[in-house]
Image (cartoon, grey):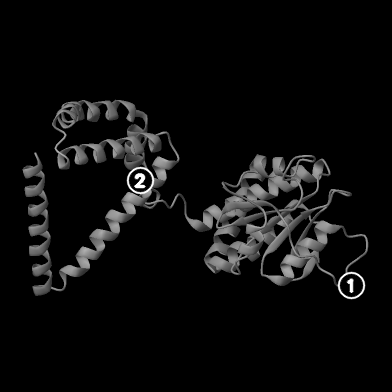
């Protein structure tokens, strides 16, 4: 068995050597090699990420351990152990297919139904995803305003606010109105501080923001408003603030506070300064077209 193992290693090495010689005669093949390696490593990376999020991760670690033991048994000439493991290896493959059946089926369904961009990890067009997250934040803000629950939600834009995210509790969660409302529920561990949305994810909660100390700020403004103004002055982030005293919704942008916003005005400001500014005039025209369609449908209803 050890001789077979050595022969296989020699064959692999000879193949690599001949391939490298071939590359030296045809440099263009180097590009295809790089592309090949990038695709393979990316697929392995996505597989590992997927495995870590499922029960497959523990099983994969067990499989790697068994393969290491098999290799060691060949090298150290542990014949009995090697024979036992070799006999049961084919049955192990069948067992893996049975164990991973739900995961394999899910992956095949995604390959058959989803776009190529989704297969490679891009779930949705970034512009659409950003707009959807804005709508979800608006829904959450309206819910918090109804119950007069204080809230502070920060949208990171071009200037990264990594230091702010790191001083909070990192979440890396999908944006949802329910989660945002729960995060600001009084007497919960993370209700104080700000929720930061970065790269279309809730990056962190309970984040401490720098407070604005301008003398021009009205005295009746609370800590949340000062924190929202502070982050909007130190970066290009936009902060949505829900007042605990009045239930009114405000936006802090470029060091300016726009107070007492209704749903439509809140949506227009966020879309304009987060979506349109990033994705250009096409996004704005598409949003206006969708708004006209919705208005027409509402009138017909």
Q: Which mark is residue 245?
A: none
Visible residue check, residue 295: no
Residue drawn at (8%, 68%) of the image: 22
* Lateral position of residue 185 relative to residue 174, left or right: right
Q: Residue 20: image x %, image y %?
A: 12, 67
Circle 1 crowding by C-alpha within 10 Å: few under 14, some 14–19, many from 20: few
Vertical placement of residue 104 versus 252, above or below = above
Q: Residue furthest right?
A: 219
Mark nearer the N terminus (2 vs 1): 2
* Lateral position of residue 44 relative to residue 229, left or right: left
Residue drawn at (59%, 65%) of the image: 276
Visible residue check, residue 112: yes
Vertical placement of residue 59 versus 127, above or below = above
| Residue 230 position by quadrant | bottom right
Q: Residue 287: image x %, image y %?
A: 58, 58
Q: Give the position of the C terminus as an image quadrant.
A: top right
Q: Which residue is mark 2?
A: 47
Q: Which mark is residue 216?
A: 1
Q: Residue 36: image x %, image y %?
A: 23, 59
| Residue 260 position by quadrant | bottom right
In what element is the residue under mark 2?
A: helix
Vertical placement of residue 275 versus 63, above or below = below
Closer-to-camera residue (169/68):
68
Q: Are marks 2 and 1 in contact (CB under 8 Å)?
A: no
């Amino acid at each position: 068995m050890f001789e077979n193992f050595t022969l296989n290693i020699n064959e692999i090495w000879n193949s690599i050597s001949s391939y490298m010689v071939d590359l030296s005669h045809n440099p263009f093949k180097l590009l295809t090699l790089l592309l090949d390696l990038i695709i393979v490593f990316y697929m392995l990376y996505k597989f590992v990420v997927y495995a870590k999020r499922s029960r497959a991760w523990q099983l994969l670690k067990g499989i790697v351990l068994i393969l290491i033991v098999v290799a060691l048994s060949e090298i150290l000439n542990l014949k009995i152990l090697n024979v036992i493991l070799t006999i049961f290896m084919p049955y192990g493959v069948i067992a893996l297919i049975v164990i991973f059946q739900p995961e394999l089926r899910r992956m095949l369904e995604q390959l058959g139904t989803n776009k190529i961009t989704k297969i490679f990890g891009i779930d949705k067009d970034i512009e659409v995803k950003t707009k959807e997250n804005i709508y979800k934040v608006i829904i959450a803000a309206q819910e918090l305003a109804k119950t007069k629950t204080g809230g502070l939600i920060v949208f990171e834009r071009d200037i990264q606010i990594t230091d702010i995210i790191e001083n909070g509790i990192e979440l890396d969660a999908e944006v949802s109105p329910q989660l945002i409302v729960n995060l600001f529920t009084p007497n919960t561990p993370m209700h104080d501080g700000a929720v930061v949305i970065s790269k279309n994810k809730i990056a962190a909660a309970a984040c401490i923001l720098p407070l604005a100390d301008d003398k021009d700020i009205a005295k009746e403004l609370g800590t949340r408003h000062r924190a929202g103004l502070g982050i909007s002055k130190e970066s290009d982030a936009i902060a949505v603030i829900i007042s605990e005293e009045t239930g009114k919704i405000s936006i802090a942008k470029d060091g300016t506070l726009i107070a007492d916003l209704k749903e439509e005005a809140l949506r227009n400001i966020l879309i304009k300064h987060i979506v349109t500014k990033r994705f250009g005039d096409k996004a704005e025209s598409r949003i206006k077209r969708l708004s006209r369609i919705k208005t027409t449908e509402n009138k017909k209803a």
